[in-house]
Amino acid sequence: MDTLSYKTKSAKPAEVNRNWFVVDVEGEVVGRVASKIAAVLRGKHKASYTPHVDTGDYVVVINADKIRFTGNKMADKVYLTYSGYPGGQKARTAANLMAKKPTAIVEKAVKGMLPKNTLGRAMYKKLFVYEGAEHPHAAQKPEAFKF
C-alpha cells in the first residue's frame, strides 16, 4: 500500500521574496482599496502565505490626495486622536484631514486592517504613501498593481 505524504510548507523569514508594487488610488474608494493594499502587505496574494511570518510585499501608494469617499463620509466621518491628558481628545472630519494631510487617510485605513501586534507593525513599515504622482522608489522598479 502506497501512502502519500504531503507536508504543508511553512515560509521562513529568510526565504521570503519581496516585490515592490505601485498603486494609483486616484478616484478609488478608500475602504475598498485599503483592504486590497492590506492583503498585499500581509502576503495573502502569495501561495507561500504563512500567518505567523511577514511574507508581504512593499506597496507604494500615489495620488493619495485624489482618493474618494462614498456618500456623505467626507463631511460626517470623524477621526479621533487622544493625547492621554484630560481634555486631550481631538476630532477631525475626513474633509479637514484631507486638506491638512491626505496621506493620513490611506495610512489610517490600511493600518486598521492589519494585525494589532509586532507582526502587523512590521507589515505597516512596508507601506509608502505619497500625495502626488511622484515617488522616490523608482530604483526598486515597482510594478503596477492591478485590482
Image: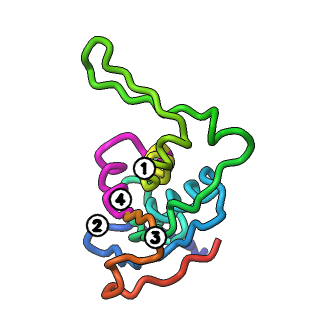
- At a point 63% along the width and 36% down the height, the residue shown is 75
Q: Is residue 9 magenta?
A: no
Where does the magenta region start and end? 113-127
Left or right of 13 on screen, residue 27 = right
Residue mark closest to the camera, 1 vs 3? 3
Residue 104 is tagged as 1
Decide which of 15, 65 is in the foreground and name it. 65
Q: Is residue 125 magenta?
A: yes
Give the residue type at disc 2. Pro
Residue 53 is tagged as 4
Give the residue type at disc 3. Gly
For residue 129, which quarter of the picture?
bottom left
Residue 31 rendering spot, x and y as whole percentages: 61, 50
**Badge 4 element:** loop
Left or right of 28 on screen, residue 43 = left
Q: CA distance from mark 4 to mark 2?
A: 6 Å
User: What residue does disc 2 label?
Assistant: 13
Residue mark closest to the camera, 4 vs 1? 1
User: What residue does disc 3 label?
Assistant: 132
Q: Give the mark, 4 or 3, whose residue is nearer the N terminus.
A: 4
Q: Give the mark, 4 or 2, whose residue is nearer the N terminus.
A: 2
Q: CA distance from mark 1 to mark 3?
A: 14 Å
Residue 86 rendering spot, x and y as whole percentages: 28, 11
Residue 87 rendering spot, x and y as whole percentages: 32, 13
Residues under numbered marks 4 and 2 in contact, where contact means CB atoms less than 8 Å apart:
yes
Q: Give the mark, 4 or 1, whose residue is nearer the N terminus.
A: 4
- The answer to whether residue 57 is above or below residue 142 is above
Label 3 packing within 10 angstroms: few (<14), some (14-19), many (20+): some
Q: CA distance from mark 4 to mark 3?
A: 32 Å
